[in-house]
Image: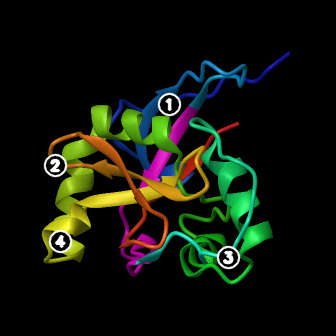
Amino acid sequence: MSTRISVPDVRKFWDAQGGIYAGTVHPRDGMPAYPLVISLSDEAHIQPAEYCKPEATFPPGSHWDGRGNMRSLLEADPANPIATHIRALRIGGHADWYWPAKLECAVLYANVGDLVYAYLRAQHAQQWATWMCQRTRNVETAFIQDFRHGCQTYKPRVTKFTALVVRRID
């Protein structure tokens, strides 16, 4: 028997979970649905860095599973500046933050994109900072989500961008 949790309205701060409730993700790859929380706190601010070292090799990523993608990235590039920053985060009493995957970013844009855009604008003065990246299935590129206009694209994985942190409630 599973325990049912009470979630706040989308876009509201979820005190017990350390961030803003961004909605429930319904993966189409067999994973169970899960609530997604994003942190837009000062601690979550990540300096721009490249996705990973050019020589790092790892299997293609998932469009849904950002947590698994970050685990694979850290195995291939243990000193990755973005992933190690995220792994060290302790926000709202939680230490299971991760870098969202492509379709988790789509959920973020749809439900809290304006909040993310305002956060990124406050953290960074440059236009490119309104984008964030995560791994694609092609190991040579990183996924980019534009939180101003909603477009999604790919860039070489050595391009420097910032990232956002999320956690799923299992």
Q: Name the residue under label 2.
A: 148
**Quadrant of the rendering where the C terminus is positioned:** top right
Residue 7, label in figure: 1
Mark before the other along the chain sequence, 1 or 3: 1
Most foreground residue, 17 or 163 = 163
Q: In which quarter of the image is the N terminus?
A: top right
Q: From the viewer's perspective, is the residue at label 2 or at label 1 nearer?
A: 2
Q: Please report contact status of discs 1 and 3: CB closer than 8 Å, yes or no.
A: no
Q: Label 3 sits on what residue type?
A: Glu
Q: Amino acid type of disc 4?
A: Ala
Decide if residue 162 is on the left or right side of residue 75.
left
Badge 3 marks a residue whose secondary structure is loop
At mark 2, the secondary structure is: loop
Badge 2 or badge 1: first in the primary sequence: 1
Q: Which residue is drawn at 16% across and 49% down?
A: 148
Query: Which marked residue is nearer to the observer: mark 2 or mark 3?
Result: 3
Residue 72 circle label: none
Answer left or right for 88 relative to 59.
Answer: left
Element under disc 4 = helix
- Residue 59 position, x and y percent, is 75, 51
Q: Distance between the residues labelled 4 and 1?
A: 28 Å
Q: In the image, is residue 41 part of the stretch drawn in magenta?
A: yes
Q: Give the magenta-colored segment's residue range.
A: 35-48
Q: Measured from the top left, where is residue 79 in percent x and y?
A: 69, 84
Q: Height in image: 28 above or below 89?
A: above
Front position among marks 3 and 4: 3
- Front-lying residue, 38 or 28: 28
Residue that label 3 marks: 55
